[in-house]
Image (cartoon, helix red, strand yellow):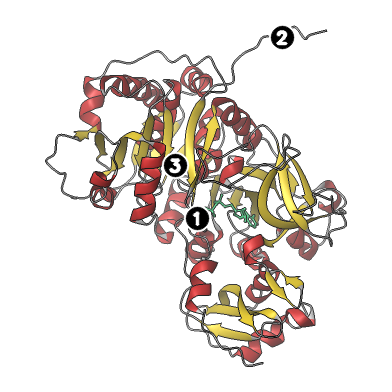
């Protein structure tokens, strides 16, 4: 017997209509060099429908790729909805990528138009002739005085919008492509992930829920995670869908400016990678604020950072785990029932995990070769694999040999994890960052956590260094807090009681800064090449 309910398509224009009809008074604030620019969802909705008209006038193909190259802003949010709601595919380009990667990605996706913030226009313009499919460059004037090239491809966003007619939205096939995003590709070429309307709709519902971001009309949400980094983790869709107001930092991404926005604009929910919160902490500590949740992921959230927020800002960090391939949010470390009354240190340990898969996502740990399931005893590790309606099945036209899905239909994450008896995930490492010593694996994440609990340490990244006898041994690269001094012995003495004896780093190097990737994560690749010739003493 078949069910008798409507086959209502789960599309992005359905989210749009909900916001347009019910939350017109919600506000959108965009940071700019001349101060915050204020608007409402009602104004945004009118402009978004007109932007649909602009895409028609520009002659963008029915499923043409609409590139963006900009900060988090109201205009970017207009593009987030206008492109997919007219059947086009939004393609967010990462403004911090290397030029060759940007060229590769724009050509691979076949972007027809790219919408570019004026503050980053010079970065983009020098590449425009290498992007073979780009016919139009639409400049969004977000301030600054960067010269606007006199070129027939260049158009002005506000002029186009003023001349445009609003359009009706009506995507009926929920499995159409809605947007695409490339992973940074630490090995090989960047890989394109193509989201559907359906996956976006379901991910939006999932992250609004209380165990994840818990968004509602009383919230003021500020995505610090860029809209080009895995969909701003879904916040740019989830906040409007839940009627929450939005604060978009625009180019005002300095830690001090972010703290100021949090305080001035009454932000209740925000999210970004650990390095962002590391930088913001001294500017927020002791200030009056209305935050109820700080989401963080993209790499392991050190226990020490979360605890520093609990002590100095009044709330710990909520860790989430995910990948571009999982839309990206797939698990959250909201405390399980059994730990709600635990002591502070036990709770802090739980928060240092990737946590429980979101409702809708299933997770398992298996031997990567045999797919043999590993026990959920929080000790055994295996490759973390996931499945669910917002997990990718394939990449977009991948290079030969790149396979995302196992023969039994699970998505390979490339992360190594343990799971406890309730299936809470603890990420040990990325497969490629594990340190192989004497045939056993050492988790760089656990070592970093231990080192970062030293009160004088600001950041620590541990990489494997080739070793003639053991294959690899850990080297700890440590950044001290401003004005602090410490010796190798201080660091090693601190972690000795915290880690297994054979995990102890063979050496500690004090460095000025841990190199970061284009989305602000520790770049182990850069560290490994910096210390490629490193001679370990033992
Ligand atoms: P890339 O870093 O290649 O740009 P993603 O942003 O999609 O791609 O990164 C996904 C990866 O980030 C995951 O596979 C995992 O290794 C890491 N990651 C994300 N969240 C966490 C977390 N909470 N703890 C540990 N690692 C994480």
Q: Nearer the viewer, residue 487 or 431?
A: 431
Could you tell me residue 501's position as x and y percent? 78, 82
* In the displayed structure image, the side of residue 382 where residue 27 appears, left or right: left
- Tell whether circle 2 marks a residue whose Cβ is less than 8 angstroms from ligand 1: no
Residue beneath the point at 61% across and 74% down: 462
Q: Nearer the viewer, residue 110 or 330?
A: 110
**Label 3 SS:** strand
Q: Can the viewer see residue 304 in this picture?
A: yes
Residue 5: which disc?
A: 2
From the image, state whether disc 3 or disc 2 is nearer to you. Answer: 2
Could you tell me residue 377's position as x and y percent? 88, 57
Residue 188: which disc?
A: 1
The single residue placed furthest to the front in the displayed view is: 400
* In the displayed structure image, the side of residue 150 where residue 45 appears, left or right: right
Residue 269: which disc?
A: none
CB-based contact (under 8 Å), mark 1 and mark 2? no
Tell me the residue that label 3 is attached to: 247
Q: Can the viewer see residue 242 in this picture?
A: no
The residues tagged by marks 1 and 3 sit, at their Cα atoms, a distance apart of 36 Å
Locate ligand 1 by image quadrant: bottom right
Residue beneath the point at 48% across and 22% down: 16
> Compared to 4, does 65 lie above or below?
below
Dot placed on the residue nearer the N-terminal end, 1 or 3: 1
Q: Nearer the viewer, residue 400 or 406?
A: 400
Q: What is the count of numbered marks?
A: 3
The residue carrying pointer 3 sits among few (fewer than 14), some (14 to 19) or many (20 or more) residues within 10 Å by Cα, namely many
**Label 1 SS:** loop
Q: Nearer the viewer, residue 500 or 451?
A: 500
Dot placed on the residue nearer the N-terminal end, 3 or 2: 2
> Compared to 234, does 55 lie above or below?
above
* In the displayed structure image, the side of residue 179 where residue 352 appears, left or right: right
The residues tagged by marks 1 and 2 sit, at their Cα atoms, a distance apart of 45 Å
């Amino acid at each position: 017997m078949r069910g008798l309910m409507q086959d209502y398509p789960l599309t992005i224009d359905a989210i749009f209509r909900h916001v347009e009809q019910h939350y017109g008074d919600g506000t959108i604030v965009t940071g700019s060099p001349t101060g915050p620019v204020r608007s409402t969802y009602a104004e945004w909705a009118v402009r978004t429908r007109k932007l649909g008209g602009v895409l028609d006038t520009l002659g963008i193909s029915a499923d043409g790729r609409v590139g963006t190259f900009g900060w988090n802003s109201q205009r970017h949010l207009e593009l987030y909805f206008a492109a997919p709601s007219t059947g086009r595919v939004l393609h967010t380009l990462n403004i911090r990528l290397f030029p060759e990667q940007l060229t590769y990605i724009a050509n691979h996706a076949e972007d027809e138009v790219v919408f570019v913030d004026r503050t980053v226009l010079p970065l983009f313009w020098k590449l425009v002739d290498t992007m073979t499919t780009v016919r139009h460059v639409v400049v969004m004037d977000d301030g600054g005085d960067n010269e606007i090239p006199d070129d027939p491809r260049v158009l002005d966003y506000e002029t186009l919008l003023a001349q445009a007619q609003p359009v009706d939205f009506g995507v009926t096939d929920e499995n159409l492509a809605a947007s695409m995003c490339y992973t940074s590709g630490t090995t090989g070429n960047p890989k394109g992930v193509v989201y559907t309307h359906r996956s976006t709709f379901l991910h939006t519902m999932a992250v609004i829920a209380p165990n994840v971001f818990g968004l509602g009309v009383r919230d003021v949400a500020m995505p610090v995670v860029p809209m080009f980094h895995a969909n701003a983790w879904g916040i740019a869709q989830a906040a409007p869908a839940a009627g929450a107001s939005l604060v978009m930092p625009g180019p005002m991404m300095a830690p001090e400016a972010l703290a100021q926005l949090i305080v001035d604009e009454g932000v209740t929910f925000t999210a970004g990678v650990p390095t962002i919160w590391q930088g913001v902490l001294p500017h927020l500590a002791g200030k009056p604020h209305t935050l109820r949740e700080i989401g963080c992921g993209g790499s392991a959230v050190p226990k020490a950072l979360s605890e520093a927020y609990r002590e100095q800002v009044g709330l710990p960090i909520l860790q989430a785990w995910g990948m571009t391939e999982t839309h990206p949010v797939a698990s959250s470390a909201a405390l399980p029932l059994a730990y709600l009354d635990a002591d502070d240190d036990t709770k802090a340990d739980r928060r240092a995990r990737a946590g429980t898969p979101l409702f809708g996502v299933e997770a398992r740990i298996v031997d990567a070769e045999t797919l043999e399931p590993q026990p959920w005893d929080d000790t055994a590790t295996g490759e973390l694999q996931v499945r669910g309606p917002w997990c990718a099945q394939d990449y977009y036209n991948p290079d030969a040999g790149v396979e995302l899905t196992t023969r039994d239909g699970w998505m390979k994450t490339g992360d190594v994890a343990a799971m406890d008896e309730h299936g809470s995930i603890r990420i040990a490492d990325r497969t490629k960052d594990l340190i192989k010593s004497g045939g056993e694996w050492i988790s760089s994440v656990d070592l970093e956590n231990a080192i970062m609990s030293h009160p004088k340490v600001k950041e620590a990244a541990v990489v494997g260094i080739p070793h003639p006898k053991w294959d690899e041994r850990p080297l700890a690269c440590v950044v001290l807090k401003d004005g602090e001094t410490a010796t190798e012995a201080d660091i090693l003495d601190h972690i000795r009681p915290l880690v297994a004896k054979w995990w102890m780093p063979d050496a500690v190097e004090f460095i000025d800064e841990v190199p970061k990737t284009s989305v602000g994560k520790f770049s182990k690749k850069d560290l490994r090449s910096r210390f490629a010739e490193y001679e370990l003493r033992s």
